[in-house]
Image: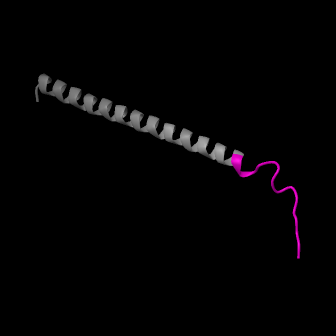
Amino acid sequence: MDIAALSILKNQAQLQQDAGVAVMKKAMGTAEQGSDLVNQMLDKAAEGANPPHLGSYLDARV
């Protein structure tokens, strides 16, 4: 193999690696946004689940 062919192969391999890293960064960013949204939803659900005026007293009639 000559030097030019080795250089082309090296550049192609580097390009594939760079593209793979870019796709992984994009996927990680999307997953992070999704997890942030889930955390916000859970926080809002926890706030509304236990209003302070409910559940303090029990009215029981038989």
Residue, x 88% and y 58% (percent of image)?
57
Q: Is residue 58 magenta?
A: yes
Q: Is residue 3 above or below residue 61?
A: above
* Residue 40 appears left or right of 55: left
Q: Residue furthest front?
A: 61
Q: Is residue 11 above or below residue 59?
A: above
- Spot occupied by residue 47 in the image (x, y as percentages of width and height): 71, 45
Residue, x 50% and y 37% (percent of image)?
33
Image quarter of residue 14: top left
Pick the quarter of the image with the C terminus.
bottom right
Specify the principal SS of the magenta part: loop
For the residue pair 23 and 10, the one nearer the viewer reads as 23
Q: Is residue 27 magenta?
A: no
Pick the quarter of the image with the N terminus.
top left
Image quarter of residue 58: bottom right
* Residue 62 appears left or right of 33: right
- Spot occupied by residue 44 in the image (x, y as percentages of width and height): 65, 43
For the residue pair 61 and 42, the one nearer the viewer reads as 61
Magenta part of the protein: which range? 48-62
